Amino acid sequence: MTDFQRPWHQLYPPEVPTTIDYEERPLQDYLRSSAELYGEKKALYFMGKELSYKVVYEQAEALASYLQELGLEKGDRVSIMLPNCPQSVISYYGVLMAGGIVVQTNPLYMERELQYQLNDSGAKMIICLDVLYPKAANVKPDTPLEHIIVTGIKDYLPFPKNKIYPFIQKRQYQLLVKPEQSTDTHLWSHMLKKASGNVAPVDIDPKEDLALLQYTGGTTGFPKGVMLTHFNLVVNTQMSKKWLYKCKDGEETVLAILPFFHVYGMTSVMNLSVMMGNKMILMPKFEPEDVLKVIEKKRPTLFPGAPTIYIALLNHPNLKKYDLSSIEACISGSAPLPVEVQERFEEVTGGKLVEGYGLTETSPVTHSNFVWGNRVSGSIGVPWPDTDAKIFKMNGDEEAENGEIGEIVVKGPQVMQGYWNKPEETALVLSEDGWFRTGDMGYMDDAGFFYIVDRKKDMIIAGGYNIYPREVEEVLYEHSEIQEAVIVGVPDPYRGETVKAFIVKKQGSDITEEELNEYCRKNMAAYKVPRLYEFRAELPKTAVGKILRRILIEEEKSKYEESESIQ
């Protein structure tokens, strides 16, 4: 592309460069740098316990030496199956220091899912919570696993919480797990005492060597391991730092609700905080009132999140009791940000909340609105520095006109190397010259702002009309009595598909299907109006808060097939 074809560059504020001179360093180097610059500064706050950058670095070194003593070699994969806790940060950087490749593993995985990921990645070791140890132990004989390192929430709780927590854990999980140190099971506390801390140097080529295998959500077939190098992750973190140009190294406090086992939380919270020497407030579980309390007490300045997180806070009955004025900037990702949510959150906090966009395959961020500057509500913003994007016409490689809907394709130094051991699937989405097909449908306006209309596969075709769920959802979110809404296409013998709305009402609402139908008919074309409504107490979500539309689609498909078989 020429500069003429990048109209968004004209929109950049002077503080944001269009291109960056990236450091070619292994990702773990940033923890060492921050430990040298901010040694005694607090890096982590966790349920009353604080750890300095010096301590986090020393413990990551201890883990790295221990892993090497267990036989870890450069390029070996290590699964990390932890929520947001000190061990998740220490493990991530410790594995990289040892020369390993991190395999982030969702702690909510069932044994079948865990076994698939361990076999596909070939992970030799796993670091997990004690309550997850039975799952790891059960699948170990059928996977390449050689060692399990076990830790617990109590390991980093202050007194007396560390003494009380096992009893809470027993009540919560109906089990009390007490793994013992052995040749293939290793206790975190034992590791910290026995590790030499002498890490054998590992020669890392940032552009060639993988730092991470990040598995996709598996919305189509089995999850795929996205191969991200040290350089992929370093550049996306440096892009993020440049975008947040008002934030100061060593002075910000970041609310870490987004899970680190998700690439968005890993980059926008953990890696960015470590690179800048900022303090992270770790929250292993999203409980709205706990979050409100922490914001008032610990005064975070940065709060990366997802729309469902902001929606839950805004609709909490005790919201007005808490002071949220410390929040200065939030970039929302993982799902579309309703305009009403953006405006109300900014009103409540006084900070900025803007929508961004990215994918696992892009480390993850490619676009965002400007936090301080020109923005367009309802848009995902403009491409980040050194990132190109364009729209391909439907089912082709021809570039679309401005305003024309097609598939968003992106290119930049944050784009993955490919899918682990899946060259055919890689070739379907990644061209030889580096263009990645996102599978998202959208368009670009004349100024260079991009808009998502929906996932290519989520588009509903009803009676010959193309209906984009996001468009209908935006109308529903504008209704004062709706907390959450998701639109899916369900099988229909006459129209092919028909539009169904799943609704979570705001507390105290008694809105009816008839009232919603009347509202929708006043605000959108008749062919887009939902024909079916279902009210639910909650909607299925990922750990990062993204509504799982595919689960609702599968439920509806099963219902339809069952009804067809009965007839």
Image (cartoon, rainbow, N blue to C red):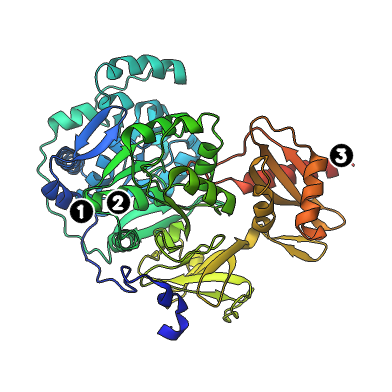
Q: In which quarter of the image is the N terminus?
A: bottom left
Is 154 situated left or right of 446 in this image?
left
Q: Closer to the N terminus: mark 2 or mark 3?
A: 2
In what element is the residue under mark 3?
helix
Is 215 situated left or right of 128 in this image?
right
In what element is the residue under mark 1?
helix
Identify residue for label 2. 271
Residue 275 rendering spot, x and y as whole percentages: 24, 53
> Label 2 is placed on what type of residue?
Asn
Identify residue for label 3. 566
> Label 1 is placed on what type of residue?
Tyr
Q: Residues within 10 Å of mark 1 (few under 14, many from 20)?
A: many
- Tell me if residue 120 can be seen: yes
Residue in the foreground of this view, choosing between 415 and 270: 270
In what element is the residue under mark 2?
helix
Is 479 situated left or right of 111 in this image?
right
Q: Do the residues labelled 2 and 3 touch (CB within 8 Å)?
A: no
**Label 3, label 1: how far apart the Cα atoms are:** 61 Å
Q: Eyeballing the image, is 42 above or below 404? A: above
Identify residue for label 1. 30
